[in-house]
Image (cartoon, coloured by chain):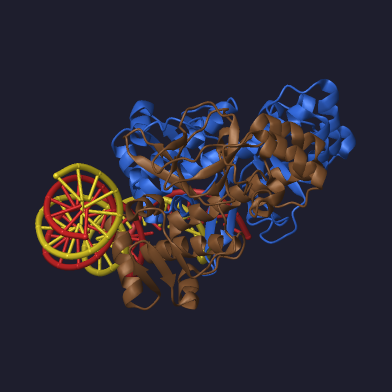
Chain colours: A blue, B brown, C yellow, D red
Amino acid sequence: MAISNSNNRFSSKLTSQCQNCSLSALCLPIALADEDVNRLDQIIERKRPLKKGELLFHQGEEFDSVFAVRTGTLKTFNITNSGEEQITGFYCPSELVGLSGIDENHYPVSAKALETTTVCEIPFSHLEQLSSQIPSLKHQLFRLMSRKICDDQQMMVLLGKKNADEKVASFLLNLSHRFKKRGYSATAFRLSMSRGEIGNYLGLAVETVSRVMTRFQKNGLIDVDGKEISIIDMAEMEKLVGASSECANIEHV
Amino acid sequence: MAISNSNNRFSSKLTSQCQNCSLSALCLPIALADEDVNRLDQIIERKRPLKKGELLFHQGEEFDSVFAVRTGTLKTFNITNSGEEQITGFYCPSELVGLSGIDENHYPVSAKALETTTVCEIPFSHLEQLSSQIPSLKHQLFRLMSRKICDDQQMMVLLGKKNADEKVASFLLNLSHRFKKRGYSATAFRLSMSRGEIGNYLGLAVETVSRVMTRFQKNGLIDVDGKEISIIDMAEMEKLVGASSECANIEHV
DNA sequence: CGCAAGCTTGAATCATGTCAAAATGGGTGG
DNA sequence: CCACCCATTTTGACATGATTCAAGCTTGCG
C-alpha cells in the first residue's frame, strides 16, 4: 500500500499511484480491486525525503500515521532511562513502521533515517475507516501486525539464546531475505547501518560485531568491504543460524 | 471479552456471560453496548479446563482461534532446531494468547498450561467479522496487537541490554503489575512457573536465576519462599529496573 | 588536506554459564 | 500418615565468551 513510484514525490494526494508502485504488492500484499487501490491512494501522502539523521517521528509524540518506507532505511529506537539509545528495529523499503503507536496513541519509539529516505504517510484513522469498508484490507492489517509479533518473538529468541556468531549470522541472513524479497541480490548488499548500530540492536559490543565479521571473512563465510557485504557460503551461514522453523521468512514490518 | 464467571464452565455458547465476568473489562477493555457484548458472547466458547502440562495448541497447528485466559497460567514456547524449548511468553488471566497465528494461519508457537487453566476460545474468523460491525471492537483489536508489539519490544530491550539482576527484577515487577491490574496484591504473589522456565524466558541459566533471587532476599529487596514471592523494597526494585518510560504499564496480551 | 567518526585489533577483566553435588519439596503408594 | 523417590532448587568451584579499555588504523566529509 501506499508506496508509489510517482516521480512527483512531493505531490498531493491526487498524484498518489500505488498502482504503479513496484512495492505496493509488498507493503500491503493483497490483491485489491482497482477501485479499492484508488481509495487507498486517496488517503496516502508522500512526504519530502528525510535526510540522514532526520527523525520521522519521535518517542512520545502523538500517533496519527503509520509509514511505509519507499526508499532508504529507518531505525526505530528508544532512549532508556540511563540515557542510552536502544535500537528496536531497522526498516527497509516496503516495510511499515509505526504500528506500535496504536495502543497508547503515542509513538513509544523514535524513527530516524539512516540515509536519505522517502516514506508514504498513511493516516491511521483513515486506514482504519477504510478497513471497515474493505474486509481484505482489514485482514491484511491484522496479518501485518501478527507477523510483526511473530518476528519480534524470533528476535527475542535470538537475543536470549544465541551467541555472538549466531546473532551476527542471523542478522545478515535476515537482511539477505528482505533484499531478496524485493528483488535484489540475496548475496551482495550494502549495510546502511554502522557496526555500532548493529551491535546495539543485537545486544553486542561494537568490538564483538567487528571481530565476528572479521572471523567470518577469514573462514570464507562472507566477504566484507566496509559496508559492502557478500555472502559467500550461504549454506554454512544458514547452518549457523539454524533455520528456525516457523516465522522463518522473516521480514520486519 | 469472552471471559465469563459462569459456573457452568462447560456450557455451550448460550450460557456465555461476558457481562458477568470480572475480567471482561480487561480482556477487551472497551465499553461495549450491552447489545454488542451479547453478540460477542455468542461467538465465545468456554473450554474444559486444561490440566497442568496440557497443550492448548501446538506449534504448526492450524490457527483458528485466539484464547483469553480465565484462570490459571499458560506459557508459549517454540522448539528450536536444536531441540530445546524457548519460552516466548507467560499468560495470566484476562490476557489473550494466539495472536501470532493470524499471519501464517498457523500457530508459530505451542501453548501449555503451567497449572490447571481455563480459557475462553474466540474463533478468529467470527471475531473479525464482528469487528466489521462494531468499529470499537476493531479498534480494540488493533490496540491489543499494537500493545503486544510494544511489550515484545520492551522484552527485546530487556534481553539485549540488561544484566541478570535487572532481568529478574524486571520480570518480578512485570508480574506484579499484571497482578495489580487484576485487583490482586502487587507485592505478594505466587510464581506459577519454575525457576527453569524463568531462566529460559529471560535468557539466563537456572542457577543464575536462583542466585539472583537469593541475593535479592539477602539484600532485603524481596522475600522468597519457594514459589511465593513478596516484594519488600519496591522502590529499590524499580530503581533496578529503571522505569523504562513508554510502554511501561507492561502487560502481556 | 586534515580532522572526527567509525572501525579494527589486542590484552585484561568480569559476568554468566557449566559442571557437580547437596538440600529441599511435592507427589505417590504402601 | 509416613516413607520414598524424583524433580526442582540451591550452592560452590571453575571455565569461558563477551565486554571493557586502550591504541592504532581507515574512511568520509568539510
Q: Which residue is at a point 39% across and 65% down the rendered structure image?
A: B228
Residue B229 placement: quadrant: bottom left
Q: Quadrant of residue B139?
A: top right
Q: Which of these two is toward me, B214 or A43?
A: B214
| In the image: residue B239, left or right of residue C9 | right
| A79 versus B79 height, above or below | below
Please indicate, yes or no, whether residue A146 appears anywhere in the rendered image.
yes
Position of residue A118 measured from the top left corner of the image (x, y, whole percent): 71, 42
Where in the figure is residue A249, as x and y percent of width and height? 51, 30
Q: Is residue B234 left or right of residue D16?
A: right
Q: Quadrant of the N terminus of chain A?
A: top right
Quadrant of image for the C terminus of chain A: top right
Seen at 34% across and 38% down, the residue is: A217
Q: Residue furthest right?
A: A14
Image label count: 0
B248 versus B2 height, above or below: below
- Position in image of residue B208 (x %, y %): 30, 60
Image position of A207 with respect to A80: above or below = above
* Picture residue at 74% right of the left edge, 51% below the top: B30
Residue at 72% of width from left, 46% of height from top? Answer: B140
Give whichever of A81, B107 is nearer the camera: B107
Task: List x then y, in percent, for residue B6.
Answer: 63, 46
Visible in this render: residue A123?
no
